[in-house]
Amino acid sequence: MSNAAFIEDWNSIVPFKIKAIDLEKPTEQFVYKAILHFFKLMHYDVSSYENMYSESTETITSKRVELVARINYIYQLCSDSKQTSFFYIDLVKPTGKKIVHLLKILLNYLFYINMVKESVQEKANLCTEKYFELKVKLNQKQIMKEETKIRANDINRHIDDLKNRLPQLKSQIDTLHQRKNALQESIATLKMNDQNLADQIIKLKVEHSELTDQIVTDEEAASMRSTKNSLEKEIETLCDTEKQLQKTYEIHVASINEIRPCNALLEKLLQFEFDDSCKNLRKELIELNTLYDKLQKQHTSLMNVSDGLQENCKEIEALIAEKKQELDIRTKVSEKSDRKNDHKLLEKEKHLKALQDTNEIFEQMLAIQRLEVQRVVEMTEKSLMVIKQNLIE
């Protein structure tokens, strides 16, 4: 590099401007100021050197030696030759060749430091950005970790609650078993009552056939009128009973539909397989669901029986209408022979009394069935209340 190019580069960077004549005949003050400004650009602390020439001779000498040593370190660090050194004499009595070589090395070193500084600063900025990104990710992971820990604690707490509720659920299952046995007994009773009703219906049909084969007299007409009235009352009673059974059946179906979601929730709760008691509890719940389905089918069967009874009642009404027509015709003929058939009238009164007794038996059986159905409904409602209360807890 020529001196002119060097001077231009130096003056473009260093505040201390130099001239060509300064390089040809350098002085100690020139070298001192150039080195001082170089150190300032390197961000060195040069406050101890700024006023050294106003101090004592010994202080000036010691500071010159110190300054030369620091310059010599950089000079040897950046010089091509290990033998090149900057001596005390080069500061006190500088030569143009040595000073030009020194300043060029210092300028190149300054260029290198600035370049390294820029690259290092860029890398530092990148590292800083990466650090903050990693810090944000770390904070997010820490938050996620805390949230996961909280969820795990909640799950463990929920599991402990379920474990604590297992004895209570077991007690409820025992209660449901007792209810199951009671319902089975009620079903057996209902079956027996249904069989008795079927037998009574068959008997009534046989008696009705026997009556249709007999000649209707005046006494028989009066008896048939009474029978008609009693049968009409019985039909009304059966219709009312049918409506009540229908309402009871609807209530029972609604209760079963309310119990099913509770059972589904219980099955979902019992999916946590803690021990054998949970498995037994699940099996018992499945058996209870099967029992509910069976009860519903039996109620459907009862409704079918009720429909059959209604159809029979309609047939009886039709038959009564036919007999009424016959009675109207025969009443005109049989009014003359009322006294002759008193003994037959007594027999028909006995038969009417038997029919009334049969009607009372039917009413008692229907009352028993109502009580049994009502008891089943009440037990179902109590079970629903207990299950809902446990689910709320």
Image (spheres, rainbow, N blue to C red):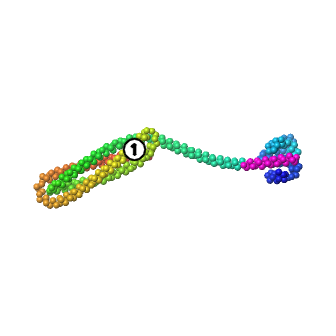
* Depth order, front residue of 241/315: 315
**Is residue 356 in sight in this rendering?**
no
Q: Quadrant of the C terminus?
A: top left
Instruction: Please give the name of the residue rendered at 89% of the width and 49% of the height, measured from the top-left corner.
Output: 25
Q: Does 101 sit left or right of 137 as displayed? A: right
Q: Helix, strand, or loop for circle 1?
A: helix
Q: Does 162 sit left or right of 40 as displayed? A: left
The x, y position of residue 160, in whole percent, is: 48, 41
Q: Is 110 within the magenta?
A: yes
Residue 48, placed above or below residue 215? above
Most distant residue in the top direction: 276
Instruction: Please give the name of the residue rendered at 35% of the width and 47% of the height, measured from the top-left corner.
Output: 294
Instruction: Please give the name of the residue rendered at 33% of the width and 44% of the height, measured from the top-left corner.
Output: 183
The x, y position of residue 18, in whole percent, is: 84, 52
The x, y position of residue 103, in whole percent, is: 83, 48
The x, y position of residue 318, in whole percent, is: 23, 57
The magenta-colored residue range is 95-119
Q: Is 120 within the magenta?
A: no
The rendered magenta stretch, by its main secondary structure, is classed as: helix
Count of marks overlaid on the render? 1
Which residue in the structure is indicated by mark 1? 286
Q: Does 192 sit left or right of 288 as displayed? A: left
Mark 1: amino acid: Ile
**Is residue 159 in sight in this rendering?**
yes
Disc 1 crowd, CA 10 A, few/some/many (<14, 14-19, 20+):
some
